[in-house]
Amino acid sequence: MSINLANGVRDRLRIAIQKSGRLSEPARALLASCGLSWRESRDRLFCYGETLPVDLLLVRDDDIPGLIADGVCDLGMVGRNVLMEQAADREQRDIAPAYREWRALGFGGCRLDLAVPESWDWTGAEQVAGKRIATSYPGLLAQWLRSRAIEADIVNLSGSVEIAPRLGQADLICDLVSSGATLAANQLKPVETLLRSEAVLAGPAAAFGDVRAELAELLLRRLDGVLKIRDSKLLLFQAPRAAVPGLLELLPDAEAPTVTSIDGSDRLALQALCHGAVTWQRLEDLKRAGAAALMVLPVERMLA
Ligand code: PRT
Ligand code: ZN
């Protein structure tokens, strides 16, 4: 298979995802649930789209914003932290942001936090003035410091940020945190959140001027359907007519239900799409409020 990676007008859509790492499997799974499938090339860097003209480029996550900016890829799935760090860097160098976040994807969640040695008494952001802060996110950290008019030294490290205070390279750190276990293992504690991050779909700032516009629109429609139903369940139950208003109050996250009357009785059958978790607790609350024959069904696909 010959692959033309040149820029310009194209009739296929090219999406960059992480080759290997935290985001690679969930990104593939999400695209697969949008009905995409691929033929893998031998070098496993490029996957040719079979069901739709949508190809994958497997790269390091840090390369994704640049690939979109350069027009080598049309879209990318990358952490908001990476996208915004590179946008901050472009801003600092007076380069226009060539990409933007199109959708939040609901996986790869983490925070960019300031963390200090556990022995510190944290009194507030001004405490970092004049201190050395180790980070791999110098652009976002500089923005945050500027927004608070705080001056501090940024120690730019590409990895192992969390051991910098113990090595005497820095006084505190600014790094990604998910469970907090890494901070705890290094006797650090989180004190401020600079950014809440998750994987996002990034695309160009300007619209596509060719067939890729339709492909991107189709993909977004499917993606929205998948994201919307990810935590959604179809709830079926029966209830006496008089109990229905009270029951609907217990379902604030449900869309307007379909209501059917049951012949020859005062009872109604209801069907409601719920967008939040339908836990045992919620089912028990509904039962107490008059619902019966409760059933929770998974939703496989939805097209609004
Ligand atoms: O090779 P490539 O450059 O593509 O991969 P990478 O090593 O740069 O990235 P990878 O796979 O580690 O992370 C990809 C993306 O996952 C990040 O850009 C974030 O958007 C997201 N993500 C989510 C995380 C974390 N959670 C996370 N916990 N990225 C990194 N971490 C690290 C963090 O840096 C720290 O070292 O995990 C440690 C903290 O984890 P906890 O659970 O101990 O708090
Ligand atoms: Zn990376």
Image (spheres, rainbow, N blue to C red):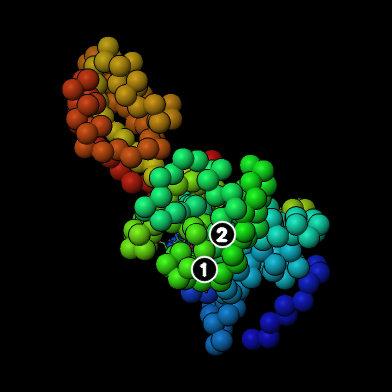
Q: Position of residue 85 (x, y in %)?
A: 63, 58
Q: Earlier in the sequence, mark 1 or mark 2?
A: 2
Asked whether the beta carbons under mark 1 and mark 2 sit within 8 Å of each other, the answer is: yes
Q: Residue 172: where, in percent of width, then height? A: 49, 58
Q: Which residue is mark 1?
A: 169
Q: Residues within 10 Å of mark 2 (few under 14, many from 20)?
A: many
Residue at position x 46%, y 64% from top? 165
Q: Residue at x 60, y 78 (%)?
A: 46
Image location (x, y in percent) of residue 273: 39, 35
Give the left or right position of residue 10, taking residue 276 as reference: right
Q: Taking 304 as reference, is 143 above or below it?
A: below
Residue 27 versus residue 11: which sits nearer the camera?
A: 27
Q: State the image quarter where residue 203 is shown.
A: bottom right
Percent position of residue 177, x then y? 43, 56
Q: Residue at x 53, y 45 (%)?
A: 127
Which residue lies at the image location 41% right of the left edge and 56% below the top edge? 117
**227 or 162, which lies in front?**
162
Pointer 1: residues within 10 angstroms few (<14), some, or many (20+)? some
Which residue is under mark 2? 132
Answer yes or no: is residue 154 visible. Answer: yes
Q: CA distance from mark 1 to mark 2?
A: 8 Å
Q: Nearer the viewer, residue 53 or 88?
A: 88
Mark 2 vs ligand 1: CB below 8 Å: no
Judge left or right: residue 86 versus residue 60: right
Q: Quadrant of the C terminus?
A: top right
Numbered disc 2: secondary structure: strand
In the picture provided, is 210 more to the left or to the right than 224? right
Which kind of residue does numbered mark 1 sit on?
Answer: Gln
